[in-house]
Amino acid sequence: MVEEMIRRLPSSHHEYRNYDEHLRRIQAGFAGEQCVDAEWLEIELPSPHYFLHNFQTINRFGSTHQMDTIFLCPHFVLILEIKNITGILSYHAAFSQFSRTTAEGVVEGRYD
C-alpha cells in the first residue's frame, strides 16, 4: 500500500520523504526477518520444534499484538521481535529505553 502511494505521489509532495522513509523501514525490517529465518535453517535442532511467523493475537480489551517469530519446543518458548537497525544499540535500565549510536557518533533515543 505504501509502495503504491509513493509511486503515485510526485517527489515534490511535502509528505513524499516521510512515506519513502516509512517504506524503507518496512523493507529493512522484512529483510531482517528473512535473514533471521534463514539462520534457523543452519541450526541442527535435535528435539521436535515449531516456528510461528508473524503471529498476531488479540487480548480481551481488543488490542492486537504481533510477534515476528515464536519458536516452540518441549523445553521452552522463545518470542523474537526482530529489528534491522544499524549502529550500536544500548539499553539504559534507569530509563527503560534503548538508544542507538550511529557510525557518525550521533546518539538517538529509540521508542518502545
Image (tube, rainbow, N blue to C red):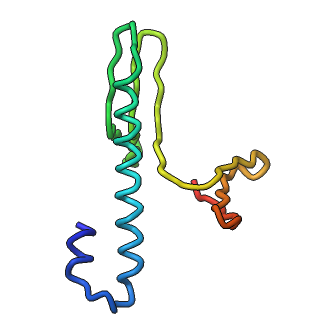
In the image, taking residue 91 as reference, residue 25 lies left or right, namely: left
Indicate the position of residue 108 as horizontal and vertical percent values.
Answer: 66, 64
Q: Is residue 105 above or below residue 48?
A: below
In the image, taking residue 46 as reference, residue 104 lies left or right, namely: right
Q: Work out whether residue 59 can be spotted.
A: no
In the image, taking residue 30 as reference, residue 5 lies left or right, namely: left
Q: Work out whether residue 74 can be spotted.
A: yes
Res. 2 image quadrant: bottom left
Indicate the position of residue 106 as horizontal and vertical percent values.
Answer: 69, 67
Res. 12 image quadrant: bottom left
Q: Quadrant of the N terminus?
A: bottom left
Foreground pick, 44 / 95? 44
Indicate the position of residue 40 as horizontal and vertical percent values.
Answer: 38, 26
Indicate the position of residue 83 as horizontal and vertical percent values.
Answer: 48, 48
Q: Is residue 75 above or below residue 82?
A: above
Q: Residue at x 40, y 56 (%)?
A: 28
Q: Residue at x 32, y 20 (%)?
A: 50
